[in-house]
Image: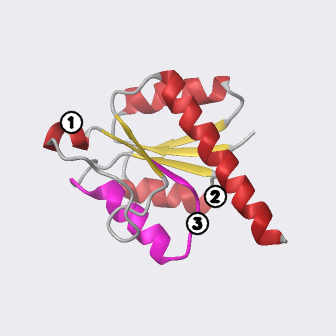
Amino acid sequence: MARILVVDDDPELTEVIRLYLEAEGHEVHTAHNRPDGLAALAATPPDLLILDVMMQAADDGLVMAQELRAAGNAVPILMLTAIGRVTRFQYDRDSDWAPVDAFLEKPTTPAALVETVQRLLAQHAKEAGHADH
């Protein structure tokens, strides 16, 4: 189906996500920090990127999303994070600060993760189809 890159500093979580998404037929690659995530993205461009916000630095995921968008990379990005629970602040998409396609709060259910991934992939495919015409 789709190639998905998961970038999160929690190896147990990336493994769980990989298992759930591979069960749905996706090819899943993982990285555990921003530099490795950027290298994996360049080596094997994904159809979808799942990012944590807080990794080595408190804003690594946001910085990575900002860098990708500034470079013109339109890969759909799902921000999977516990930052809202930690800070008690509600985060949402923002074209400059949080240039992502969706947020999911950790912990999430497998069903919510799979549904959000499928929705983003379908939305991106539809947008790509319109761009070709």
Find numbered disc 1 in the image and state the secondary structure of the residue it sits on.
Answer: helix
**Which circle's residue, 2 or 3, is located before the other in the chain?**
2
- Three-letter amino acid code of the residue under disc 3: Ala
Range of residues picked out in magenta:
58-78
- Three-letter amino acid code of the residue under disc 1: Arg
Residue drawn at (59%, 50%) of the image: 48
- Left or right of 99 on screen, residue 39: right
Q: Position of residue 68 (x, y in %)?
A: 48, 68
Query: Is 123 placed above or below 106 here?
Result: below
Q: CA distance from mark 1 to mark 3?
A: 28 Å
**Residue at numbered disc 1:** 85
Q: CA distance from mark 1 to mark 2?
A: 31 Å
Does the magenta-highlighted stretch encompass residue 72?
A: yes
Q: Quadrant of residue 99?
A: bottom left
Does the magenta-highlighted stretch encompass residue 39?
A: no
Q: Position of residue 130 (x, y in %)?
A: 77, 66
**Residue at numbered disc 3:** 74
**Cβ atoms under marks 1 and 2 closer than 8 Å:** no
**Residue at numbered disc 2:** 45
**Which circle's residue, 1 or 3, is located before the other in the chain?**
3
